[in-house]
Image (cartoon, rainbow, N blue to C red):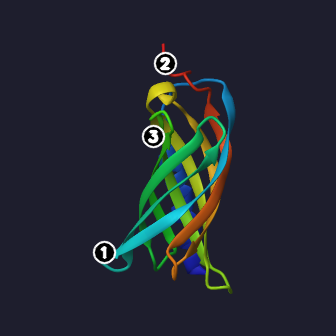
Amino acid sequence: MNRRMFVASLALAALAVLGLVRPTTAGEQVPFKGSYEGSFTFTPLEPPFQLVVAIGEGEATQLGHFSFVFPLIANTALRTGSGTYTFTAANGDTVVADVITFSTLLPSGLRLVEEIGIITGGTGRFAGATGSFTGERLLNRTTREVIGFFDGTISSPGAGNP
């Protein structure tokens, strides 16, 4: 019971901090959703932490075909993590989002990771972008494959550009 309360408190604190670092640039919010697949590696750090790096590609509204890299620090004791997604569109424009994660081991042996992301900017037509999304992904620790999706909103492409 205490552990769940601690995890819930940690999640609320993380959301509060992410809310404070959110850029002030505003623009009309449009759908930002997509799916992806790829692979991941993990490197043990000082217990209970691990560096997990996911890479891959997918399709999304506003981005079209994209690649991504997502390094995060995972706390294996609490099954939480935090990191930064960088989505790169085919033309090189990027969307950057700070993310917190919560994971659960499924009976199948796969790990379900739930994500909350706050868009903190980008480059090109996404310079100054704001927004948020939630997502889920499945990790297969045997094959090192990842598959997932996200759904949220982002300020209109180009809204941060004069």
Q: Which mark is residue 143?
A: none
The amino acid on which the numbered mark 1 sits, given as a three-letter code, is Leu
Residue depicted at x 51% and y 83%: 142
Mark 2 = which residue? 161
Crowding around mark 3 (Cα neighbors within 10 Å: few <14, some 14 to 19, many 20+) is few
- Asked if labels 2 and 3 touch by Cβ distance under 8 angstroms, the answer is no
Residue depicted at x 29% and y 77%: 46
Q: Is residue 77 above or below residue 15?
A: below
- Asked if labels 3 and 1 touch by Cβ distance under 8 angstroms, the answer is no
At which x and y percent is residue 93?
Answer: 47, 33
Q: Horizontal placement of 29 versus 22: left or right?
A: right
**Alpha carbon distance from label 2 to label 1:** 40 Å
Mark 1 = which residue? 45
Q: Is residue 72 above or below residue 89?
A: below
Crowding around mark 2 (Cα neighbors within 10 Å: few <14, some 14 to 19, many 20+) is few
Q: Horizontal placement of 151 versus 55: left or right?
A: right
Mark 3 = which residue? 21
At which x and y percent is residue 57?
Answer: 54, 53
Which image quarter holds the N terminus? bottom right
Of mark 1 and mark 3, the one earlier in the sequence is 3
Residue 5's quadrant in the figure?
bottom right
Q: Is residue 69 above or below residue 27?
A: below
Residue depicted at x 61% and y 64%: 147
Of mark 3 and mark 2, the one earlier in the sequence is 3
Residue depicted at x 64% and y 62%: 136
